[in-house]
Amino acid sequence: MQALKNIAVGFLVSFLGSIPLGYLNVVGYDVYARSGTNAMLLYLLGVMVIEGIVIYGTLIFANKLMSHTRLIKFIEGFSVVFMFVLAYVFFASGKGEVVATDDFTQYRSPLLLGIVLSCFNFISIPFWTGWNLYLLNNGHISMVKSQKFTYVFGTLIGTFTAMVILILSLNWITTKTEFFSKYLMGAIIPIGFAAMGIYQAVKFYRKYFGKKLG
């Protein structure tokens, strides 16, 4: 029963955490739209390889990671900057200045593409560190013997399921709606990333500088 609980909890947290539109989902949609299902699955496999390592590592070292405030601050600050960089890259792609999404899908190996891009998803470290610490401290998951592997398995299934649903949903929307097909990658996605960057920047400022000024 504990194994099933670990899987269910891991699935739920990962599924909900993967639903927001992030760059891994956007590139996954682009890979699917240009190269088909097999390429998308290889790409997702690459993403999950790194995701599994991050989840397992933060699960084992959650307490130590939370004590490294400078590391967490750097990761959160980098993520803010990265959101604005992505907004520019996709906006410039839509304007024809750079071919960002073409560059993404020109990789000969979607598996390698997933691994490389997932390595830049630094925000997943504080996300999983916080969640793993909460779940452990409140007894929602068990790490006895092999139980931690059932939890990691559940999280990976949750990530895979959420990303597939979002990728297929984006593809359905763009094929059914001319407006989204025309403006998704060059306007809607950049605006979304810019909005997330502003939101994260405000949170970052309040967390690290708000109290000092107050």
Image (cartoon, grey):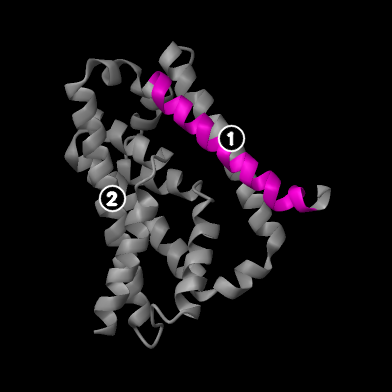
Which numbered disc covers residue 162?
2
Q: Which SS class for mark 2?
A: helix
Rendering quarter of residue 38: top left
Position of 109 with respect to 191 (left or right) is left
For the magenta stretch, what is the residue range?
Answer: 186-211
Q: Position of residue 128 (x, y in %)?
A: 48, 62
Q: Position of residue 125 (x, y in %)?
A: 53, 58
213 inside magenta stretch:
no
Tell me what residue is drawn at x 24 percent, y 77 percent.
4
Tell me what residue is drawn at x 34 percent, y 83 percent.
146
Position of 18 with respect to 131 (left or right) is left
Q: Position of residue 94 (x, y in %)?
A: 41, 16
**Can you say which quadrant of the picture contains the N terminus?**
bottom left
For the view shown, which residue lies furthest in the bottom direction?
A: 145
Q: Which SS class for mark 1?
A: helix
What kind of residue is marked 2?
A: Ala
Q: Position of residue 173 (x, y in %)?
A: 22, 28
Query: In front of the other: label 2 or label 1?
Result: 1
Vertical placement of residue 44 versus 83, above or below: below
Tell me what residue is drawn at x 36 percent, y 34 percent.
107
What kind of residue is marked 1?
A: Ile
- All told, the count of numbered labels is 2
209 inside magenta stretch:
yes
- Provide the residue designation for mark 1: 198
